[in-house]
Amino acid sequence: MERGKIMNLKSVFKCFTITAILAQLTVYPAISYAESNNEKNMDMKTTIGEKKGVTGLVGYYFKDVQFTNLSLISFGEQSKLANQTKMKKHNQTFESARWMGRIKASQTGEYTFSTASDQNIILQVNGETIINQGKMEKPLKLEKNKAYELKIEYQNIKDTSPDLQLFWSIEGKEKEKIPEENLLSPNLSERDKLSKDNKDTLFLPDFNLFNNSIVKDLPDSDRDGIPDEWEENGYRVQGYDEIVKWDDVDLAKGYKKYVSNPYSPKTANDPYTDFEKVAGFMPAGTKDEARDPLVAAYPAIGVGMEKFIFSKNDNVTDGQSGSVSKTTSSSTSNSHTVGAGTKLELSTNPFALAKWEMALNYSWTGNWTTGFEETNSQSWSREIQMNTAERAYLNANVRYYNTGTAPIYKIAPTTSLVLRDPKDPLNANKTTTIKTVKATNGLVGESLGPEGTYPSQGLAGLALDRLEDGTRISINAEQLDSIQNNSKKLSLETPQVGGQYGLLRDGGLVINDFQTWAPIQSGIDSTSGALVLDTGNINGNLARKVTAKNENDPNDRTPVITIREAVKKAFNAKEKDGRLYYTDPKGKEIDLDESLITFIFDNNTEQEIKRQLENMQDKKVYNARWKRGMNITIRTPIVSYDFENTNNVGWYGATVVNGGYTGNKHAQIAPNGNGYAKTDLELKPHTPYTVRAYVKPSAANHNVVFYTTNDGKGQEYPTTLNGDQWHVIEYTFNTGAHPENFKKLGLKNEGNAILNVDNVFVQEWGAVLGEDATNLINNGDFSEGLNWWEDHKGEIEDGYFKGSYLKSNQFNIKQNKQYQLTFDSKLDIGSNPGKIYVSFLDSGISNIEINLDNSWNHHSYKITFPTDKNVNLAFISLSPKFNLDNIKFEEVK
């Protein structure tokens, strides 16, 4: 087997455009006001999951009589308030309590309120005291279905009273328990706007009703109902209806710690207060992650195409005579340019042990790039008998996706159909917007929850075929055929999404035209960073916004967290033995340990993290500080081995022992041994992959071969390890037309001592589509500089190669198959006439000799090889410098 030469990634920056790098990534669109035919507030029926949010009082229980030593906060309290069962459960005595909320009259009339312990009660309705440590003296007139502010304070030093039950009597009739539906939760959203004149409605006022004494020990600066001390030091939810102060022993019990900004009632700047979030007072379907005050409740919407119908006829429907339907082969993505290429990297540098790629184009608009598997050699324009001067009418069958944390109602995306060059997606001169369509009428979705689709899966998609004025969407023959041959990629881009959010109020879920996501978005975006978890989920990735401190404002009390903590919060990840695990909707645990994932950053995020790591001893990305404006995608591998399960090692020739780079276990390969995965890799054609392993030798000058091969084909790289420490070793390859050549994954230990191995994985970077999909030469037009090439003092000038030696990446050729080599060449300016030799190294065929002159010449050669072989293509000159461009090497079909 031909072995690749080790290349230093540090000396050559590797990058290539990946048109599907974030498979099915839906990211944060700009959200605009949506048009609606609904002029009035739209009250929707309360569901079972939403009832708790609109009924029941909020209760505060104190260990002392002066309402200062807060023990717990309870929500959803009904007419049975302080009860002995609650007190015994907490194994403590409550000497005072306060309940806040609203009471709604079931009919118009005179009401008399009472409790089982009136002597210990002060009760107010709309700020008027009607029980003051004794029986209510005169009835109170209330109107049907009107809600009144209710406040109850309770003191009981001796704790001799029975359960505290709240009753009412209507029009002098027999007293009864106040029904559940008549005790409403307080309005939690607007309490920070209360004036000093409304101090009686504060959850934690600086006085109590019994003696009006000043309370200074329990400030609630933002009036959200959670004391400042708890917001800064931590609190948690206990059971389903209680909030308690955080204790470090709670961590071992599996509780989640919440922290928030004591000066902002809405730390994440979403529509819900910190209290509403942790209590779950949000629309049903809101993700649990959004209950954390630092994680925004927020929809992330994209539009994906599933079917593409075109016709010369004005009536474009599937099955209609003259119409042709094409099913998409690749759906969602964002086009990113990231650092990756054919390379081998070996490093003990702590920076290298924290692996990431930098996306030159890291976009946060909801883009959905579509590809087609087309086997018909006839062009699409000819298929519908279309002349070049004619236009084809389009019908894109689409579906909306929500990969965020909150539902969106009356969803109306604005979608642009855009043609982009897959090689140069950012070049405006190579980009054409066909049409931009704002959703109206049948394209407006009623509601879309997190991880859901509209229409639901199983139902037909929406027909995106007209503009708002009813005009049909059309393209010309050249554009149509460019989509077919992948010289252009059809992208559905979502620059903005109109939609509304829901609030839980008296009548249940309330939605109206004033509750639009548009003004909410700017607040969230300006105070947070973005995290995306890419696990290959068919319905899109998980998109999250996590708030962060304003570094320029010393008064900002937003909690400071690490990237590790942000990931835990954003994806509800659990920590076990120092590793993070995400559990997907099917219950599968996905290891998010830093050594088993790849980070993708934008440029600003990469520079910030580099700056932080320079000043850190433990140089891990997870340990860096989470900051506003960060954009991070976490991409999980398609295959990984951490060797933690001794009962299922997954490798032949490897023994599991204690210790490791991370975790509790790792594998060892014996001297001169070969360790390899039991399960063959199932890779895709024309797709780049990165393989990585953490290895530690037991002796100096230790030779190792890392490989993905099959029967002498594929890719392998040797290297030499020095030093008794952990190294990271990785390389990237492209499967070309024969992914079966790379199915065996393993490590050969060619040293005389044990080789320690941990955290081996395979990362997929998305199919390389377009006209170069069959080209076995990567970057033959040098649009990516010298990535994928090895040269001797060569350079790229005006988009072509200039030098005297150039060698390609290694690729596999088949016996007796015919291939075609094409390229353009000329003498470099100032060079004397001479020859260049074109060689397929170690292939067994003769070199090709070419005489050069000062003009560009196109060359084409058909070649057949005598054996199967891994080869490199080389261009060599003994004296003159030459110029090369547009190199292609393809199998002749």
Image: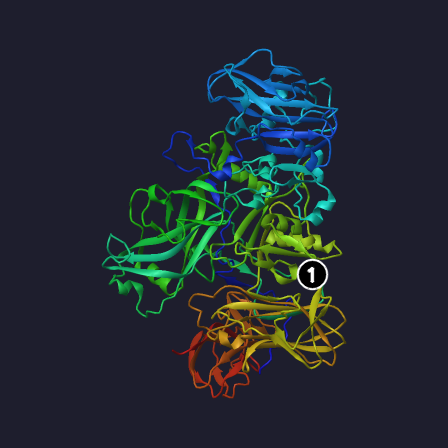
The foreground one among 229 and 420 is 229
Residue at (48, 85) in percent of width and height: 848
Q: Specify few, some or many for label 1: CA neighbours under 10 Å numbering under 14, 14-19, or 20 or more.
A: some
Measuring from the top left, give residue 826's x and y in whole percent: 48, 75
Res 283 visible: no
For the C terminus, the image quarter is bottom left
Q: Which residue is mark 1?
A: 351
Residue 747 location, quadrant: bottom right
Q: Is residue 45 above or below residue 339?
A: above
Question: Is residue 820 found left or right of 64 in the rendered image?
Answer: left
Q: Secondary structure at mark 1?
A: helix
Measuring from the top left, give residue 496's x and y in whole percent: 45, 44
The foreground one among 602 and 107 is 107
Question: Is residue 275 found left or right of 306 in the rendered image?
Answer: right
Residue at (74, 54) in percent of width and height: 616
Q: Is residue 64 above or below residue 281?
A: above
Residue 599 location, quadrant: bottom right
Q: Is residue 22 above or below residue 83?
A: below
Q: Residue furthest top?
A: 138
Measuring from the top left, give residue 104's x and y in whole percent: 51, 23
Q: Is residue 572 above or below residue 669?
A: above
Residue at (50, 37) in percent of width and height: 50
Measuring from the top left, give residue 22's x and y in whole percent: 51, 58
**Amino acid type shown at disc 1:** Phe
For the N terminus, the image quarter is bottom right
Question: Is residue 582 found left or right of 820 in the rendered image?
Answer: right
